[in-house]
Image: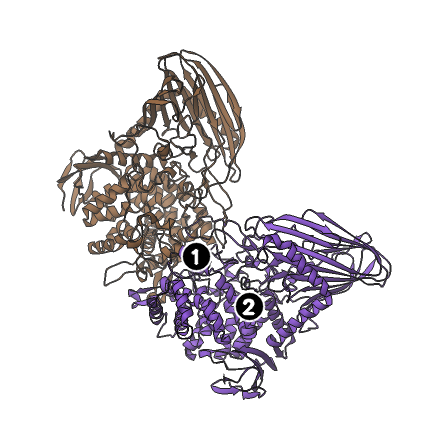
Chain colours: A brown, B purple
Amino acid sequence: MIRLEKKNLCTSHGINDWKVVEECFSPETSYRNETLFSLGNGYLGFRGNLEEGSDGTGLEGTYINGFYETETIKYGEIAYGFPEKSQTMLNIANSKRIRIFVEDEEFSLLKGNLTAYSRALNMREGLLKRTLVWTSPKGRTIELDFERIVHLGRKHLAMIRIRLTPVEADYKIQVISTIDGNVTNLTVENDPRVGSGLQGKALVTENLEANGTFGLIRQKTKNSKQTVVCCVEHVLETDCRHVCKSFTGDSTANTVYEIESNAGNTVTLTKFIVYSTSHDFCESLLEQESKRILSSALKLGYDMLKQEHTDILEDFWKRSDILIIGDPLLQQGIRFNLFHLLQSAGTDGRTSLAAKGLTGEGYEGHYFWDTEVFAMPFFVYTNPEISRKLLEYRYSILDKARHEARLLSHQKGVKFPWRTIAGEECSAYFPAGTAQYHINADIAYMVNKYVEATGDYDFLAKYGAEILFETARFWADLGAYIENKGNKFCINCVTGPDEYTAIVDNNCYTNLMARENLYNAVKAVRWMKTNLPEEYARLAHRLNLEENEVIEWKRAADNMYIPYDEETHIYPQDDSFLDKPVWDFANTPAENYPLLLHYHPLVIYRHQVCKQADLVLALFLLGDLFSEEEKKKNYDFYEPLTTHDSSLSTCIFSIMASEIGYRQKAFDYFMETARMDLDDYKGNTKNGVHIANMGGTWMCIVNGFAGMRTYDGTLSFRPSLPDQWQGYEFNLSFRGRLIKVTVNRYATAYQLIEGDDICIMHYNEKIMLKRAVPEVRKNIG
Amino acid sequence: MIRLEKKNLCTSHGINDWKVVEECFSPETSYRNETLFSLGNGYLGFRGNLEEGSDGTGLEGTYINGFYETETIKYGEIAYGFPEKSQTMLNIANSKRIRIFVEDEEFSLLKGNLTAYSRALNMREGLLKRTLVWTSPKGRTIELDFERIVHLGRKHLAMIRIRLTPVEADYKIQVISTIDGNVTNLTVENDPRVGSGLQGKALVTENLEANGTFGLIRQKTKNSKQTVVCCVEHVLETDCRHVCKSFTGDSTANTVYEIESNAGNTVTLTKFIVYSTSHDFCESLLEQESKRILSSALKLGYDMLKQEHTDILEDFWKRSDILIIGDPLLQQGIRFNLFHLLQSAGTDGRTSLAAKGLTGEGYEGHYFWDTEVFAMPFFVYTNPEISRKLLEYRYSILDKARHEARLLSHQKGVKFPWRTIAGEECSAYFPAGTAQYHINADIAYMVNKYVEATGDYDFLAKYGAEILFETARFWADLGAYIENKGNKFCINCVTGPDEYTAIVDNNCYTNLMARENLYNAVKAVRWMKTNLPEEYARLAHRLNLEENEVIEWKRAADNMYIPYDEETHIYPQDDSFLDKPVWDFANTPAENYPLLLHYHPLVIYRHQVCKQADLVLALFLLGDLFSEEEKKKNYDFYEPLTTHDSSLSTCIFSIMASEIGYRQKAFDYFMETARMDLDDYKGNTKNGVHIANMGGTWMCIVNGFAGMRTYDGTLSFRPSLPDQWQGYEFNLSFRGRLIKVTVNRYATAYQLIEGDDICIMHYNEKIMLKRAVPEVRKNIG
């Protein structure tokens, strides 16, 4: 069913599993590779554009998480309650641009000759490096070395360092370093996965400075009235004669160096870049604060800042790396994924993690359920402080989610937006947007998992409980006891994760997750009443929460209708799923996938065909509710119906295939997952990386091959090793412990690296892990 | 459930049941009354604008049936197969404008004093007349008399005649008669019933002439590239000294009369107006043909043309009038409805009947199923030649319907557009648009009814059969035999007539009507094979129609899944309808109706609540398939769930209430139906009349009170008389006969006026009607 086409970087020979290397430049792959070479720190995102400019071969992209423009959404035919305004992550002023002239010739990869070339993303150190030797059309040769950092410890800061060496002769070198405010977002028609984009320029320039080595631009969005400042400072290191000038143009601030360079002598130019927005500082202080940040960076200097940055990464990899023994390509892919997860996650409690991170404009930079269900497990079990921040973001938009619930005629509770940046629902196609009520339960699920994995009851009391209560309230109001269904609590007219089936009754995943949500809310009430009675009283008072509501939550959960066929043991995806004809896969040509780009929704909705894991996802997330036989039967039923047209699908199938012992399938699905962007399986990496899938890769190994689960709060494993590998190793954070898990062909070693003794499970065996005493157990099956 | 608010014309006292009279002018009601006073001839439509201009109190509107502009439809989030282009009936050059100046004062109803005023739509003669005595702010008094005709026999022609008489003194009168090409369509936000409209001017002026008494404008639409010409000629009758001048302005052609009028002497100005478009004549001949039509009208003169026009109406009323004895308000309402039906129906075989006729811009001038199911019965049984033309329109768009079917992945058959002008699907909200597949069966149903009522087998052979075959093919491809449903033929993912329930499986109405469609296609095959074997062979060859397809149609029909609850005898509206909670009517404030303007579609879809008759419509259209008990039980079940938020609802409930003996309900629903526009029940008559409801009024009487049915091709009646009336009378055309039906309290008289003897049924009694022998029978029950 999956159509694989490997479109590797022109480089994959000579794998360095800490690096992604481009060994030759091609305009055809430039657009895609800009995504792969993106740098980010959860706040600021730089696409991997060439400093000298892309000449239309790609998309110059610079983004700030949470910085967006709005426009009135146009509907062919509008209905009540449709979202009114779009939110689009804005492409902001481009500070990466540095043009280089050798005498009268401008440096460009598209002309002259390259006698050496390498562009490499160093994931261990978080650097993008490019080294090359270029001979101009008129025969002048220079060596160039670019190094770029988007600083992981200083969210406003990025740096570009260029080293230039004339090879054989002295040249007059001119360097023009620019902040270019003439930026627009990409506009793509007819692909719902990109969005039609903002038309024209969204930013109005309010201030522009170019003063010697300093440049600044201040711009404001036309509609959302958000302000962004970008300022830069340049440091030139050279013994050569040179002059520095500056000028402003139409929304550009430029610093110009004219250098009388000498053959063999290296000139070093460092550009320090600071971005900040009106979300960070009050508008009147924006320039001042930006300059302050810039100046404290300058004081430290490039090398110290770089050290700071690589130290942070060293710590990240220590806690988060996964080691694969026996497959360097895969090792590279996994690190690439984990690195991009880190780069993309908002860590300030008021931003989240977009479906494409900060690497491209796909899905308009919106946050979906991808964050919680697919990306967050990685953070919960390796960097829990980041997952807390991501959940705090959800808390921060509760009022907007309350408003949305009211708009949908629910007098209580919250309805989280299917897609958003600032919290308002931005889905302009409700059958596969607003109707995906399950996002409420997905968020609640991760609140619960986070608290379970961290024991962070402070979070529960301050934020988590309110999320659990308000989502539970919503379910209680959304569903109804239906006589025709044995007075069970039914949830009608929803769309589950599988968007190839829309607006159905009793989507099994939704009902299962809603039940979990309701039970967890009841549990949280009990816990707070016992442990924090005063806080509970205050919260209940503020939310107008009454005891009988909690009773109703439990009643709804106890009576939740779960579609199930006793005879076949199949959990129908929804009430109507089994009454539909199966999609005619045999007569669907390969080029007609993804189906959504080739068939009208009514045609897709009419058939048994799944875009992605739906009930199979429930088998994973709520695995303790299903018997082994049910898992196998349902996997077998849904797998042939699933196209995996969503990048959120293969990872879940891989995990479940691992669990039920389909080793080859588990591995095959995993391999499609692990290098999805590096190999551009979906053909749309140019629009940004597939963040959910990246988180899915981590889950494939930890939850899939290693079989990690936390049923009833106990960490358990059922490890197995793919035949293709010699072994693998990863660390897990769990309730203050750091545990190293090492799996080889025959056995698994568990080692407690940090924290107190803890009881874990290896298959059905309880193991008490103690510090410095590795426990080794045989793998089973 | 129904919120009645009578907003009568400021006139309803002194009812003349042939006229609609406005006895005082008010800017507040101007917009609405322009709709009521619209004139049209199925080709050309004039809103009832004041000649001197509406000063922003209303909407100057002039329309040509089938003349439209397109724009790219914007979607917040697009999907495959969504319609790309809108079609909007265009507001074209306004030729009604005639400004009058008395000395230095311009005549306007908004200033000065009216000592007499009357505006009357004379429905018997098809005239709009306005007479008034106006005293200017400076005290100058004139009598004015306006008469307007949109000619029913000459579709390109309209006429306005003004008689002006200075009352007490001689005044210098200036008359400026204009064709004003500066027109735009109305733009309304946030009401899906109007459409967002075209932004700005759609027409580009290509030619402009003003030559003495003659004026002309030629304009072309920007996108659809359709051309319209309007030319006028003026005839002034007066003994007074006068001069005539002309000039062109910015897209205006003006004829100016300066008249030295004398007190008591009447000046008469007649404006002859001709419109034609590039649909009528080839572009290069448009001016020439328009002038030819204008000149032949001028030769005949106003009085002869008026006589021609009123003769046509006399004949119309002779065949089509319904007489109500005992309720003049109602009598007026019914005639108003029949008159507007006549005025709105396209009769050239390439246009149809828009939801608002040619009276306003509601629903963008689109044709819906309203034409066939609601308006056409009136024509079939009174003016069958018009209904043939309306069906020929459907034939004319078959190729576009084929294209739409392919777009929806059906390799065979046609999918008629839910809303369109030229044949392409224009619904920008597919759950209540494209998904209403039932329109295919609705059209096929009326093909069958038309042939049954007329015996027009020529139509069947030339057009009808192909429609039946191609729609049947579509159903065969759309549905599937579903194992879970006992291998019955199921039709999934459709929306039935009730748009408050969308994208459901096995909408009962749809399945019943599809079955009828399939059977009628099989019957048509048999009839053609027997009676026109060569024509059938040719048609089958052209359509690639094979015998086994016909067998499949019958198999699908024989095995059609019809949702039915054996225990309660309820036909569930669809597979999921009974599994939903009932809408909370008790807590829905009156101002929240219509629900679609106050609740998100998901909220509405989630509940048992109907916008309009759905299953109840099937009880009527396919009445011979249901037992009396079933009809009653289902009526009782669905009635309390129905909001009648659609104007297509009350007529159907009235008819079925009549049938099951709910006399008071039948009458109440009828009364909401009959004067819906005159009393502006829905509050949106300003956007145009409710054509379907107007046809529904006729059905309420003929099918409802008189109980007319044609099961198995036999004309039958079960007459009853509402308590409030003394009697009623109507004529019916059936298979070449004209039959007068007169109902009083106790009995019904049937009289054959034209045609051969015919056997009809009165209740269960067969009656052989013979010419000139009235048959009188007692009413039962």
User: Which quadrant holds residue A730?
Assistant: top left
Work out whether A62 lies above or below A704.
above
The residue pinned by badge 1 equals B404
What secondary structure is marked by label 2? helix
Q: Chain of mark 1?
A: B
Q: Residue at x 18, y 41 (%)?
A: A722
Q: Which mark is residue B693?
A: 2
Q: Position of residue A181 (x, y in %)?
A: 49, 30
What secondary structure is marked by label 1? helix
Q: Is residue A593 visible?
A: no
Q: Judge depth for marks 2 and 1 and give the one in front.
A: 1
Work out whether B267 lies above or below A186.
below
User: Which quadrant holds residue A113?
Assistant: top left
User: Which quadrant holds residue A476?
Assistant: bottom left
| Amino acid at pointer 2 | Asn
Q: Position of residue A80 (x, y in %)?
A: 50, 55
Instruction: Please give left or right for residue A418 compared with residue A207 in the image.
Output: left
- Which residue is more in the foreground, A84 or B170? B170
Most extreme residue toward the front is B534
Q: Chain of mark 2?
A: B
- Which residue is more in the foreground, A541 or B259? B259
| Amino acid at pointer 1 | Glu
- Which residue is more in the foreground, A360 or A117? A117
Disc 1 crowd rating (10 Å Cα; few below 14, some 14-19, many 20+) is many
Q: Are marks 2 and 1 in contact (CB under 8 Å)?
A: no
Work out whether A47 lies above or below B313.
above
